[in-house]
Image: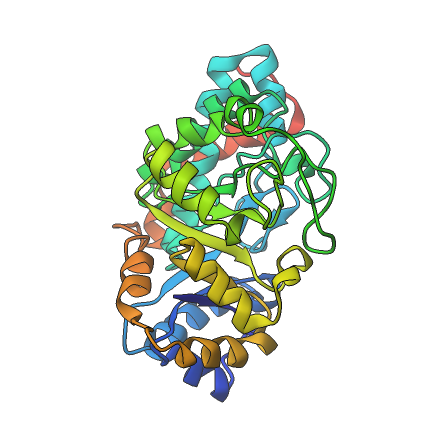
Amino acid sequence: MLIIAVAGKELEPRERDWLAHAAVAGVTLFARNFHDRDQVTHLIDDMRASSPAPLVICVDQEGGTVQRFREGFTVLPALQTLGERYRTDPADAISLAEQHAWIMASEMRAIGIDVSFAPVVDLGRGNRAIGTRAFDADPEVVAALGAAYVRGMRSAGMAATLKHFPGHGSVAEDTHFETACDPRALQTILDQDLQPFREGFAAGAEAVMMAHVVYPEVAPEPAGYSATWIGDVLRKRMGFQGVVMSDDIGMLGAAGVGAVAERIARHRAAGCDLVLVCQPDAVPEAIAAVEAMHDFDAGPGVRAAQSLSGRAAAEWNSLVSNPQRDRFICALHDLSSGAVSA
């Protein structure tokens, strides 16, 4: 049930042991793991060879400020640029969102990445962690572009992960470094922040990532620790049957319930299928915590991770010779430069 992280550009002996453990369902990669395309492809192959079971390999390749792999890959504009285009040409913006998603996902699939945690469907209302990662402040705009982005990812053979449920954009705090509390009523959140999630689910999104934000009018704990948010709102009220994952349990917004073992137990009890452990030094404690669970069964977590495994994808050389890719890259370059499509 754990999605873990590793320290560098090559696997250490202890990391090979982690990847062989039944508690580990996948790995998420960061800029610290990347030098160039050949190196990261070799690292991905090495990680898969170190595990007796299929691993799901993940990354945050959103574009803008959050693009872990840059050298040798298309530079992706921030999602906010799509929201800006939507204001003048909604149809073009929707088309560009699908193209942005296809480029991102097809490049990741070509090197063996299964999942890029995208798209961000938080509302762009000044959150310090979200910023230009959000499409827009308007729920209708975010819903339209988010659904288009899901379609583009899925057309490239990649599952989509909507984040951060039930919406991180309407608080100022960055939960990497701060606790965050959103005092609004459930109905307000349903009417605003959850509209993009509903449209994303309708478009086929396979997963959601939870927010480390407290919504005290709904539940007293951060959403990823809340059976109310996951079981009652997400599963029952919204009918979502896909994969639910935590955000990184090393973030300060997740720390209030106790140490690593307690964080994992609370996420599991609330209904998370997968738990992200993005600080390598926390991985041994996380694995030990899972081992100590008297009712631990690796099966559900493995099945959840494998349901997100990437589908058929082009090899890199085939991808770069695809004229569609060239057209999409030109369109995204025009978007970044502010050019208006013909």
On the question of residue 342 being in view, the answer is no
Q: Tell how many labels.
A: 0
The picture places residue 205, in percent across and down from the top left corner, at 36, 38
Quadrant for residue 55, please give it: bottom left
Q: Establish if 59 lies above or below 25.
A: above
Q: Residue furthest bottom?
A: 13
The picture places residue 7, in percent across and down from the top left corner, at 58, 75
Of 306 and 311, nearer the camera is 306
Quadrant for residue 124, please give it: top right
**Which quadrant would the N terminus be assigned to in this image?**
bottom left
| Residue beneath the point at 51% across and 20% down | 93
Of 126 and 10, nearer the camera is 126
| Residue beneath the point at 55% across and 22% down | 139
| Residue beneath the point at 34% across and 43% down | 206
Q: Establish if 324 lies above or below 265.
A: above
In the rendered view, how is the structure colored? rainbow
Q: Report whether 289 appears left or right of 173.
A: left
Q: Report whether 228 appears left or right of 281.
A: left
Q: Establish if 25 lies above or below 92.
A: below
The picture places residue 87, in percent across and down from the top left corner, at 60, 14
Quadrant for residue 106, please give it: top left
On the question of residue 105 being in view, the answer is yes
